[in-house]
Amino acid sequence: EIVLTQSPDFQSVTPKEKVTITCRASQSIGSSLHWYQQKPDQSPKLLIKYASQSISGVPSRFSGSGSGTDFTLTINSLEAEDAAAYYCHQSSRLGTFGQGTKVEIK
Amino acid sequence: EVQLVQSGAEVKKPGESLKISCKGSGYSFTSYWIGWVRQMPGKGLEWMGIIYPGDSDTRYSPSFQGQVTISADKSISTAYLQWSSLKASDTAMYYCVVVPATNDAFDIWGQGTMVTVSS
């Protein structure tokens, strides 16, 4: 089973600051890596697919990069509404999720 | 509009059986995969398994193989997740998702079904 390790587990950030979340895979997964945002009591929402492809309706401040085993989700100029948990997900072999990163607004 | 509607919350006792459902609409039910994701209280997302209703091809995460059964009834566009003997550790929110292929991102999610197992 492919293991995804996210860092950090938690981040407290001020509005307008840049946020970077990393996801490392235990083996190469090409670009089959996706990012989700989950707010309390809501279903997860897809933010980025295939490492760097944007999703219609998702603000442009969210971007992704990486391939192989190392991936990054970047939130440029964080807004208060971005307080949430963020998860990476690999779909290369069956599926697994990272443990999540909680982003709090200071 | 593609939509997944899940069955309502359940409260069960340890040892009881349970089957929860996920009804798809707005797309060709037999041409897309439906997956299941678990989220234990206060915890992260876990990929459980996925089924292709067209031919019932089913794949499980090693962590969930033998613990649950995923099935689908294409005549009513509904997928199921079932347990034969629930444990307290099965207490969680369960989400279904629909995807065109097994290696796709999870774009459409159901609203979730909360399962509580307590004596």
Image (spheres, coloured by chain):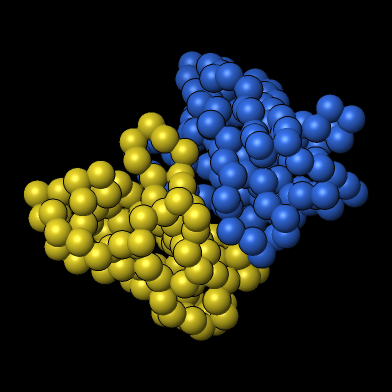
Chain colours: A yellow, B blue
Give the image location of residue B63, x and y in percent. 59, 53
Position of residue B58 in the picture relative to residue B102 (left or right): right
The quadrant of the picture occupied by the N terminus of chain A is: bottom right
Nearer to us in this view, B2 or A26: B2
Q: Quadrant of residue B28?
A: top right
Residue A24 visible, this angle: no
Position of residue B22 in the picture relative to residue B92 (left or right): right
Nearer to us in this view, A81 or A86: A81
Nearer to us in this view, A39 or B10: A39
Position of residue A81 in the picture relative to residue B99 (left or right): left
Residue B118 visible, this angle: yes
Give the image location of residue B107, x and y in percent. 57, 50
Residue appearing at x 36%, y 73% in the figure: A72
| A68 shown above or below B49 | below
Position of residue A80 in the picture relative to residue A28 (left or right): left
Residue appearing at x 85%, y 33% in the figure: B73
Give the image location of residue B11, x and y in percent. 53, 17
Give the image location of residue B41, x and y in percent. 39, 35
Q: Quadrant of residue B75?
A: top right
| B11 shown above or below B61 | above
Q: How many marks?
A: 0
Q: Quadrant of residue B9?
A: top right
Residue appearing at x 46%, y 44% in the figure: A44
Residue appearing at x 73%, y 33% in the figure: B25
| A14 shown above or below B3 | below
